[in-house]
Image (cartoon, rainbow, N blue to C red):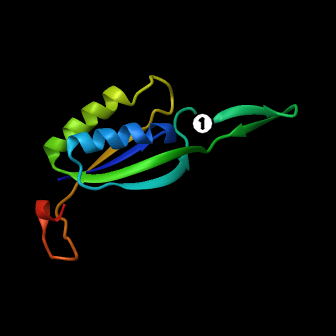
Amino acid sequence: MKKLEIVVKPEKLEELKVILDECGANGIMITNIMGYGNQKGYKQIYRGTEYSVNLLPKMKVETVVLAETAEKIIDKVTEQIKTGNYGDGKIFIYDVDDAVRIRTGERGVEAL
C-alpha cells in the first residue's frame, strides 16, 4: 500500500477529486495549507507600496491506495493537473506497512 500526499492549488481540487474517484481511491483527507516552493511567493504593489506575499494557499490531499492504483493516480495527476507554471504542486509517496479499521479490527487492504 502507498500513501499519497498531493499538494495542489485550491482551484485544482475538484479536478483532483475526480481523478481520485475514477482511479478508485476509497477515502481522502483534505487540509488547507500555506507554503511556497521555488518561486518564493510573489511581489505585489498596494497603494504604491511594494510587499512580498511568500505564503501561498495550497490544498493537501492524502489517500492510501494499492501500489498499482498509486501509479495510475500519479500518471493522471501529472498529466491532467499540470499547467507548466511554478506552483503546480507536488506528490509525496510513502510506503504503508499496515492499516487497521478501528470499528471492525480489519487490517491491511480490507481496512481501506
| Quarter of the image where the C terminus is located | bottom left
Where residue 99 sits in the image (x, y, percent)? 19, 65
Residue situated in front as seen by the camera: 93 or 83 = 83
Residue ID at (12%, 59%): 109
Where residue 79 sits in the image (x, y, percent)? 32, 26
Where residue 76 sits in the image (x, y, percent)? 28, 32
The quarter holding residue 52 reads: top right
Q: Residues within 10 Å of mark 1 (few under 14, many from 20)?
A: some
Query: In the figure, is residue 79 to the left or right of 35?
Result: left
Indicate the amino acid at tag 1: Lys
Query: In the figure, is residue 53 to the left or right of 29?
Result: right
How many marks overall?
1
Residue situated in front as seen by the camera: 28 or 107 = 28
- Taking the view exactly as shown, the residue that stands out farthest to the right is 48
Using the image, determine if residue 78 lies above or below residue 1. Answer: above
Where residue 1 sits in the image (x, y, percent)? 17, 53
The quarter holding residue 107 reads: bottom left
- Taking the view exactly as shown, the residue that stands out farthest to the top is 84
Q: Secondary structure at mark 1?
A: loop
* Residue for badge 1: 40
Query: In the figure, is residue 87 to the left or right of 109?
Result: right
Query: In the figure, is residue 77 to the left or right of 84?
Result: left
Residue ID at (87%, 31%): 48
Residue situated in front as seen by the camera: 71 or 20 = 20
